[in-house]
Amino acid sequence: MVKQFFSPYKVAMFDLDGTLTDSGRAITSSVEYALSQFGITDQPRQKLETFIGPSLYDSFTREYHMNDEDCNKAVALYRDIYEKERMYDVDIYEGIPELLETLKEKGFTVVLITSKPLVFAEKILTRIGLDKYFDHMVGPTLSDHSSDKKRLIETAISTYNLEKKSCIMIGDTAYDIKGAVDAGIDSIAVTYGYGSTSAMIREGATFVADSAKEILSFLC
């Protein structure tokens, strides 16, 4: 007799960059442009990819030890080129539309939890046709420098009256997994994005998924 799997989850919270979309080109090329205005060139791609996930302010401070003035200038330069030329240079990961469609058919509440300014995230999802699957979207304003996923998750739970035990966070970086653990919900670490799988496991990921199909297997 085959034992049936009963999932406790009814709310799927998704990170955007590196989880739903491959936005590496858009982000790293915008970072390269901002850095070039400071005379910083020829940066290794691996270092540029550390900007995918956390806030820009945190990344410019951490990786290039910029003071507040230079950090604000770098972020402004990034956002200018990103919004004008790079924002829609993204690819949807294989199987993501089908995953979201299935979750909606099964009655899931689907929530976006992103450290990208919400105004950008909304435009991107609308352009690529994924906006229709989301019940709620939570992210910072342009003036909010924080990328604290715990705070964003808790904001979603309180604002939309979600039951914590029914929520699960899906993301590709240690920031996503730590945010979920700190907020007291389960998580799925996806390996096809830009984060370190070992780092996500160290942060306490509940599950590890290599594909959209495998994500679905943990949800229903």
Image (cartoon, grey):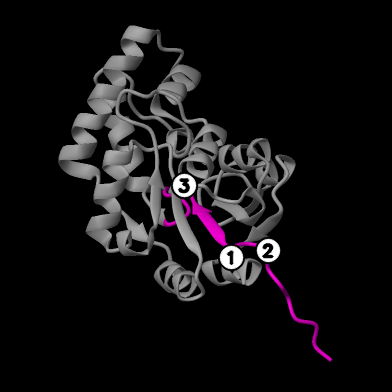
User: Gap between marks 1 and 2, in whole Å?
Assistant: 14 Å
Which span of residues is magenta-colored? Answer: 1-20
| Label 2: few (<14), some (14–19) or many (≥20) C-alpha neighbours in 10 Å | few
Tag shown at residue 160: 3
Q: Residue type at mark 3?
A: Tyr
Residue 178 position within the rendered picture, expressed as x and y whole percent measured from the top left = 64, 37
**At which x and y percent is residue 30?**
28, 35
Main SS type for the magenta part? loop
Q: Is residue 36 visible?
A: no
Residue 214, above or below 140: below
Q: Which badge, 3 or 1, comes first in the chain's sequence?
A: 3
Residue 11 in the magenta stretch? The answer is: yes
Which residue position is annotated with label 2?
8
Residue at image coords 55%, 66%: 211
Q: Is residue 214 above or below residue 193?
A: below
In the displayed structure, would residue 182 be above or below residue 126?
A: above
Which is in the foreground here, disc 3 or disc 1? Answer: 3
First in sequence, mark 2 or 3: give its number: 2
